[in-house]
Amino acid sequence: MFQINPNWFYVSPWTIIIAALVIVAFVAIAILYGIRAHRQQVAAGKEELIGKTAETVTVMDPKGTILIQGERWVAISDKSRIEPGEEVIITKVEGLKLRVIKKE
């Protein structure tokens, strides 16, 4: 008859200690990165657009389309007529429209 040898189930204490240390180190690093991620300021959304430079796609007199970060937005020029290809600076976000001024 087949017999089970108890030595087959032996695990070295050093193996257990090393495995436990690796798991503790992984959890500690994961917690540290999680804390760092929560402390950083949000880098997305409409608040991030203010002050950035965009390129006009259509003539803005005063309303037109601009391209920023690969997205097309409807924009309104605060002052003068702006030709396609010129750079503008975003000054305000109003819903889905952006207020811009011509970059000097």
Image (tube, helix red, strand yellow):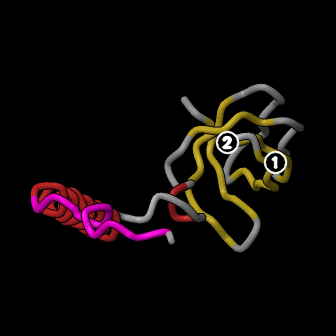
Residue at (59, 50) in percent of width and height = 90
Q: Amino acid at mark 2?
A: Gln
Residue that numbered label 2 is attached to: 69
Measuring 77% from the left and 36% from the top, which residue is drawn there?
A: 56
- Residue for point 28% across, 70% down: 6
Q: Nearer the viewer, residue 59 or 27?
A: 27
Residue named by callout 1: 72
Q: Residue furthest top?
A: 85
What range is drawn magenta here? 2-13
Instruction: Give x and y (percent) for residue 74.
Output: 82, 56
Among the 4 quarters of the image, the one containing residue 41: bottom left
User: Hey, which quadrant is residue 42 in on the image?
Assistant: bottom left
Pick whichever, 39 or 63, lies toward us.
Answer: 39
For the residue carrying disc 2, how many other residues have a C-alpha within 10 Å: few (<14), some (14-19), or many (20+)?
few
The answer to if 69 sits in the magenta stretch is no
Amino acid residing under circle 1: Arg
- In the image, is residue 12 part of the stretch drawn in magenta? yes
Q: Identify the residue at horizontal 81%, vertical 48% (top origin).
A: 72
Residue 9 sits in quarter = bottom left
Q: Indicate left or right for 98 with 85 as reference.
A: left
Whether residue 20 is situated above or below residue 76 in the rendered picture:
below
Is disc 2 placed on a helix, strand or loop?
loop
In three-dimensional space, the C-alpha distance between marks 1 and 2, rounded to whole angstroms, equals 9 Å
Q: Residues within 10 Å of mark 1 (few under 14, many from 20)?
A: some
Q: Is 62 or 56 nearer to us in this picture?
A: 56
